[in-house]
Image (tube, rainbow, N blue to C red):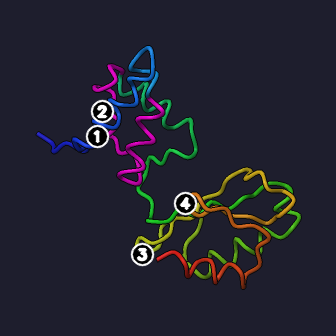
Amino acid sequence: MTEKVLTSGDISEIEKAYQHFPLRSAACIEGLKIIQKNHRWVSDDAVKELAELLEMSPAAIDSIATYYSLIFRKPVGRHVIMVCDSVSCWIMGYEGILNHLKNRLNIGYGETTQEDRFTLLSICCLGTCDHAPAIMINNDLHRDLTPDKLDAILETYK
């Protein structure tokens, strides 16, 4: 028998979330967000356990999880860097920011640094076109970027 992924704390949080919905299954996204908040990503075993808890099939949970780009179905680093690749960021030099990140961290899109510190992903828009180029690290938005600013920002995430 495999060891359970969800802790009693995870289960308690998810149960509290589904109290606010008419059906347990309506708390699916909240459940996925809780798992990711506590474990950094949502494993196949976590999907199965959540499905059982919410009285859904694992396939239904997985279809929802894979639809949303901010639900991570593969392990990620302690800090997730989302690089905006919208038209505005592209025009304002996002490629220079992306190349600087790739060179500095020695990773490409979808990869995690060896020390598990950063994962690099793209996002289609961060909604800050007037301050492009932009990235988001975890939930922190960074705008009007230059390579020098980027180096200082990265140093704040240990």
Query: Label 4 vs label 2: CA separation?
Result: 26 Å
Task: State the mark number for residue 138.
Answer: 4
Residue designated by label 2 = 48
Which residue range is magenta in the image? 28-56
| Amino acid under disc 1 | Asp
Residue at screen point 41% across, 70% down: 116
Q: Give x and y (percent) for residue 111.
A: 51, 65
Q: Quadrant of residue 114?
A: bottom left
Task: State the mark number for residue 114.
Answer: 3
Query: Label 3 vs label 2: CA separation?
Result: 29 Å
| Amino acid under disc 3 | Gln
| Residue 64 placement, left or right of 45 | right
Bin the neighbour count of mark 4 within 10 Å (Cα to Cα): few under 14, some 14-19, many 20 and up.
few
Q: Quadrant of residue 105?
A: bottom right
Residue at screen point 43% across, 52% down: 74
Disc nearest the viewer among 4 and 1: 4
Mark found first going from the N terminus, 4 or 2: 2
